[in-house]
Image (cartoon, rainbow, N blue to C red):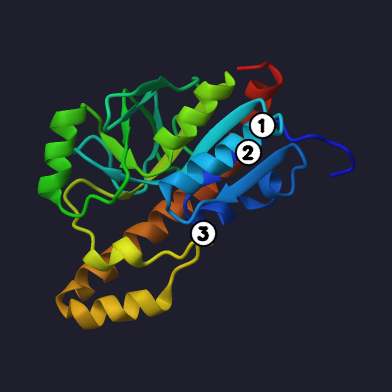
Amino acid sequence: MMGTAPLIGIVCGLESERQALGPQILDDPAVVVTASGARPHAAEAAARAMAADGVRLLVSWGLAGGLDARHDTGDIVLPKAVVGEDGGRWEAAPLPLPPSTPNGERIAQTPRLVGLESIVFNPQEKRSLAVASGASLADMESHRVARAAEAHGIPLVVVRAVGDASGRALPRLAATAIGPDGHPHIGSVLLGLLRWPSDLPALIHAARDSARAHASLSACAPVLAPALRRLAEDGG
């Protein structure tokens, strides 16, 4: 670190999302990154620790579930606000990014993302959540990172790639598929398939969708890096 204090704290759920940031961001001494293992409480704890250590900007980064037809799998989406199931609401700082990544993936804004404590698995649940929250996306980290940003009076940025579109069902084993370190828990996946063998087609679809969304994150990272740096240096 050579005495350089981080300016930017990035929280994601999965180690694969962390890796999608690429060396330009991961090797930057001004940036600290944590994968929370898709556990909301761990995401908030990490964000609060980063803020206490003096970062000037908190970022929620990774995949999100689509709740309506506005966003396709692989789209990069920048929510203007985050809402919680408890009625909380947090504004996100605007981040000037181009309308597409260098690889052509769409980068779009949306009014609202809802933060959840657990996964929504099927299209019916997604539609109900969209109506109840007014959100077009859902994830399990952004509301917790938002609480930490509010508590420390620093800006919040949310950058999410749609990993499962609104019409896509997730396999039930997804609830236990990720270990606390953010890596896939292969044993849990195999046990889940033994319990629910009919989930295999959904697992295959989910893997393909996830790969597409991760590719979008990787393509977005080079344009994200300078935008985050400018925002952090300007103090939001």
Visible residue check, residue 77: yes
Label 3, secondary structure: give it. helix
| Along the viewing direction, whichever of 91 and 181 lies nearer the viewer | 181
Amino acid type, mark 3:
Ser
Distance between mark 1 and mark 2 Cα atoms? 5 Å
86 or 96: nearer the viewer = 86
The amino acid on which the numbered mark 2 sits, given as a three-letter code, is Ala
Numbered badge on residue 49: 2
For image coordinates 30% across by 63% down, the residue present is 174
Give x and y (percent) for residue 99.
44, 30
Callout 3 crowding tier (Cα within 10 Å): few <14, some 14–19, many ≥20: some
Say left or right for 74 vs 157.
Answer: left
To which residue does mark 1 refer?
Answer: 52
Q: Going from the N terminus, do you reach mark 3 or mark 1 first?
A: 3
Residue topped by disc 3: 16
> Any mark on residue 214, and which?
none
Q: Nearer the viewer, mark 3 or mark 2?
A: 2
Residue at image position (51%, 51%) is 36
**Vertical placement of residue 136 versus 22, above or below:** above
